[in-house]
Amino acid sequence: MNDSAPIPASFRTSGTNLTRAKTHNHRVVLEVIRTRGPIGRTEISEITSLSRQTVQNIVGELESRGIVEMHAQKARGRGHPGMTVQLKPDHAYSLGFHVDRLSVTAIACDLLGSIVWQSAAPMAAATPEAANSRILSMAEEFRAAHPGMAKCLFGVGLAAPGPFETGSQTSSGTDATTFSDFGSPENLAQLQSAIGLPVVLQNDASAAALGEHVYGIGRSFNSFAFIQFGMGLGAGFVLNGALYPGATKNAGEIGHVVIDPTGPACSCGNTGCLERYLSLNALCERLGLEPTEPGSVGRIEALFAEGDPAVLGWIADVAPLMRQMINMIEMMLDPEALILGGIICPDFLQALLDSASPLPRRLDGSLEEDRIRIGTSGATAVALGATAAAVDALYAPSVSHLLL
């Protein structure tokens, strides 16, 4: 049996006995195995509300197709040990790309999220054309290095700073916090045609949340928010076991919550947005660093490690905003936990979190400081989440599969 906390029922993990819903039930079982495995068939039945015989039949079919594999549990007392089921890691692979205005990070993963290849390189220019060129060259690099795995590639996940599909009022220009033009439908169609595989797009915070949900500490929670601290500020939401992307994949743009209508102009067209104060871009402005320079984040980390008064002073100054952001998310979503991650080192994130203490009281009266966690996926969280987005598109249940 899986010793993690039981997962409440949700659409993605609830089966149906409708005779024409076989595809949905297969995806439901796969979703449970993917996010909770290795797991016993009895537990799958309990989670999905499918009969034990149905689960056994589905698992048997998936095993015969090489998608899952069975393993014996450790013997406990007398009798035969039970069997658990998990995805067969080398059945398929996915590519994930974290694209920002400075560089591209690429990861290839098996179905269990184990990284089998990775690469990173700067972009020649902050344009969709330069990003596409870098992505295509990296994809060919992977195919040349691992031709056997390349034959089993089924999709590509892309993650970039949003917001996306915002119309003419939002212009990324030279703003380091966004890369909206990369996510345009026209650019994605061109990239998908060139790469020859299905392409899925998520904003960077949602991708990181998905990565933590499938491969990181988010596995322990059914509902949580992931706060992505980068040049901009964003959040990704996993609610009732499923990523919530929003109608235009822009859910979680917490950085564009207006906290001061008389504040500085923001790239989104408003003024006084939260990320104009609480983001690495804002810290670069304070320190006189150029946020579009590749070495700026490393410089901030070095100054922080040295105990630089300007960096520590900025952390102290933004402490009230950290508390306000955490309070807003908790009151709106009532998540089990908040996970903090980003492109900066974990010690810096921990200092930001410490500066926000004591945190506001939750409505349930909880004051536990450990309700906020530092993510475990590190700097590769976004790219790792992009690979998970590709797997999600292929395997996860959706309403469309129930349309009869």
Image (cartoon, rainbow, N blue to C red):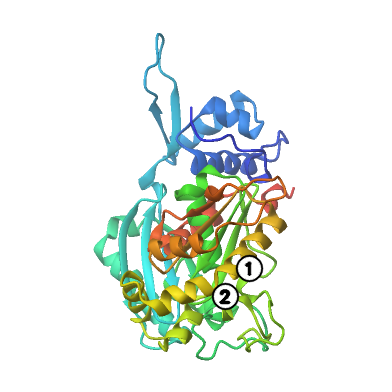
Judging by the rendered image, the residue that carries numbered circle 2 is 162
First of labels 2, 1 by sequence position: 2
The one nearer the camera, 31 or 350, is 350
Within 10 Å of disc 2 (Cα), the crowding (few <14, some 14-19, many 20+) is many
User: Cβ–Cβ below 8 Å for labels 2 and 1?
Assistant: yes
| Vertical arrangement, residue 133 with respect to residue 326, above or below | below
The residue sitting at 39% across, 77% down in the picture is 309
Q: Is residue 389 visible?
A: no
x, y percentage for residue 301? 35, 72
> Of helix, strand and loop, which one carries label 2?
loop
Mark 1 residue type: Lys
Q: Please provide percent x and percent y for residue 204.
A: 51, 68
Q: Is residue 219 above or below residue 378?
A: above
Residue drawn at x 60%, y 70% is 321
Q: Which residue type carries mark 2? A: Gly
Q: Secondary structure at mark 1?
A: loop
Q: Quadrant of residue 153?
A: bottom left
Q: Residues within 10 Å of mark 1 (few under 14, many from 20)?
A: some
Left or right: 240 in relation to 180: right
